[in-house]
Image: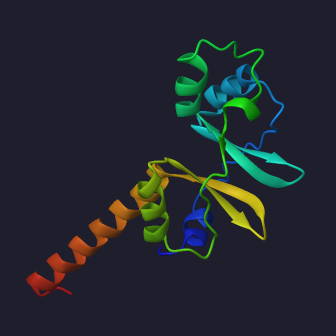
Amino acid sequence: MGLLSQILQTRSRVLYVQGPHQTVDTVIRLMAEQQIGAVPICENGQLIGIFSERDFLRRVAAKGLDPARTELRAVMTPHPITAAPDEDRLVAISKMQAIGCRHLPILANGTVIDMLSMRDLLFVEIAAREQEVAELRQYISGTY
């Protein structure tokens, strides 16, 4: 599974798009209920930001803002890094490591179609390495 599209086909879609005027308290409840770490923020069908657990901690809780009165627009991460379904998973991991993010919106034709987390990508990477090790063991033992 080298391409992001292959990873997306093996799992349920995880996408809870929010608008920039939505309040933080509403979105935090949604994130807790759905057990997700981030949501894409779209306006007029275009991705304008992402709001994550980290954004909540650093930009809302740490600053003493009232989540019921704070709109996502004020505390989201604007212009997030994105990927396309035809990108390689290793490229996606490198992008995320370069800026220290954990969630990656996947865009097709300018529209958010899904979200992948670093965890999603690392589980695939671990499975690929386990497969390589198994094949090498078979080769060494002559059962390949």
Q: Look at the picture and state if 7 lies above or below 76.
A: below
In this view, 101 is above or below 10: above
Type of colouring: rainbow
Residue at image coords 75%, 49%: 48
> How many marks overall?
0
**Which quadrant would the C terminus be assigned to in this image?**
bottom left
Question: x, y (%) of residue 5?
Answer: 61, 71
Q: Residue at x 12, y 87 (%)?
A: 142
Percent position of residue 83, x then y: 61, 65
Quadrant of residue 34 within the rendered picture: top right
Q: Residue at x 78, y 24 (%)?
A: 23
Q: Position of residue 81 (x, y in %)?
A: 59, 57
Nearer to me, 31 or 9: 31
Q: Between residues 120 and 104, which one lies in front from this camera angle?
A: 104
Quarter-of-image position of residue 131: bottom left
4 lies above or below 24? below
In this view, the residue farthest toward the left is 141
In the displayed orientation, state which residue is furthest to the right: 44
On screen, residue 138 versus residue 30, left or right, reads: left
Q: Nearer the viewer, residue 139 or 26?
A: 26
Residue positioned 37% across, 63% down in the render = 125
